[in-house]
Image (spheres, rainbow, N blue to C red):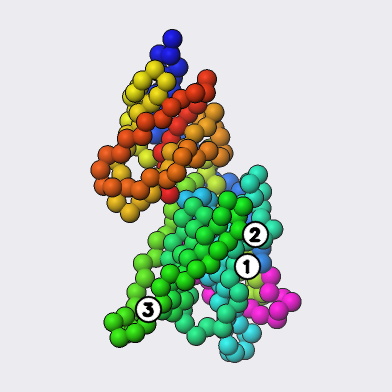
């Protein structure tokens, strides 16, 4: 007697992929930073780079306001687990005197990539949220030491958020504001899928993958959940249709596939 359950589940999957809702944009959380004690002023902020986990990263340039040396710092932020405003960044670099330009290359789920001058760097968060910084590549030597060197900049992957940064009038700091679409449009990050009953207790979920993109199957007991639970490990896109066969043991469980 599994058929009614699977019919409901398939309907939910289709609704998750193609449904559209009337939405509004509302302030979700903020983060403010002040340079008054350091006697510095915010000079420049790079364009924001948003991640698929709802985080955002950017580079702040500060100076003394008198034409002295400038410094850069990367801020990587997202809300607390309960959706409230964070007290501190997920990760922030040290203030570094500008000798080479710094910018954020990409933000993925718990992964930040940035460059400084000719050096490409990676920051990963473990399951406890502890960051690890690694240098991926330093472009030096005869073969890759010339100019120019160009990095791609991946922008705006965050589902359901619009971010703004506004400097204070006296330039002593800034405030980041995260505006969220309400209802939150899960369809923005969801990958179009098709589903069929594989066996009495399992479901086949198929989707068109793209080379270079990682995908994650997620589950939830309700379609209105803020946080979906990852199922198994991420899957690398092959450029072909990928099919996941998932056992269903709960009395009611919804699934979706998202691009990371």
- Would residue 6 be visible to someone looking at this image? yes
Does residue 33 sit above or below 158 in this rendering?
below
Which numbered mark, 1 or 2, is in the foreground of this view? 2
Residues 56 and 211: in front is: 211
User: What percent of the width, then of the height, locates residue 74?
Assistant: 55, 69
Query: Which residue corresponds to the image point at 49% horizontal and 52% vertical from the top-left?
Result: 109
Residue 85 pos. (x, y %): 66, 53
Q: What residue is at 41 percent from the left and 77 percent from the top?
A: 138
**Magenta span of residues:** 34-50
Question: How far from the left and from the top, in percent, is residue 222?
Answer: 54, 29
Of pointers 2 and 3, the one earlier in the residue sequence: 2
Residue at 46% x, 25% y: name it: 248
Q: Residues within 10 Å of mark 1 (few under 14, many from 20)?
A: many
Between discs 1 and 2, the one toward the N terminus = 2
Q: Alpha carbon of mark 1 to alpha carbon of mark 2: how far?
A: 8 Å
Q: Tag on residue 174?
A: 1
Which of the two labelled residues, at mark 1 and mark 3, occupies the earlier sequence position?
3
């Amino acid at each position: 007697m599994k058929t009614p359950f699977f019919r409901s589940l398939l309907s939910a999957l289709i609704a998750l992929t193609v449904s559209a809702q009337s939405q509004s944009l509302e302030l979700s959380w903020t983060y403010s930073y002040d340079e008054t004690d350091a006697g510095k002023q915010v000079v420049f902020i790079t364009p924001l780079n948003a991640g698929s986990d709802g985080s955002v990263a950017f580079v702040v340039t500060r100076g003394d306001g008198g034409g002295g040396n400038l410094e850069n710092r990367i801020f990587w932020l997202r809300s607390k687990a309960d959706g409230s405003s964070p007290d501190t960044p997920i990760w922030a670099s040290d203030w570094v005197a500008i000798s080479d330009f710094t910018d954020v290359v990409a933000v993925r789920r718990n992964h930040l990539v940035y460059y400084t001058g000719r050096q490409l760097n990676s920051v990963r968060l473990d399951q406890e949220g502890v960051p690890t910084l690694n240098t991926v590549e330093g472009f030096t030597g005869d073969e890759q030491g010339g100019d120019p060197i160009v990095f791609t900049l991946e922008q705006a992957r965050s589902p359901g958020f619009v971010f703004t940064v506004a400097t204070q009038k006296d330039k002593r700091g800034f405030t980041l504001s995260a505006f969220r679409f309400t209802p939150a449009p899960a369809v923005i990050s969801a990958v179009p899928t098709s589903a069929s009953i594989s066996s009495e207790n399992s479901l086949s979920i198929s989707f068109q993958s793209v080379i270079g993109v990682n995908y994650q199957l997620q589950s939830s007991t309700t379609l209105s959940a803020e946080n979906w639970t990852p199922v198994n490990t991420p899957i690398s896109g092959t450029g072909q249709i990928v099919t996941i066969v998932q056992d269903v043991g709960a009395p009611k469980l919804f699934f979706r596939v998202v691009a990371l």
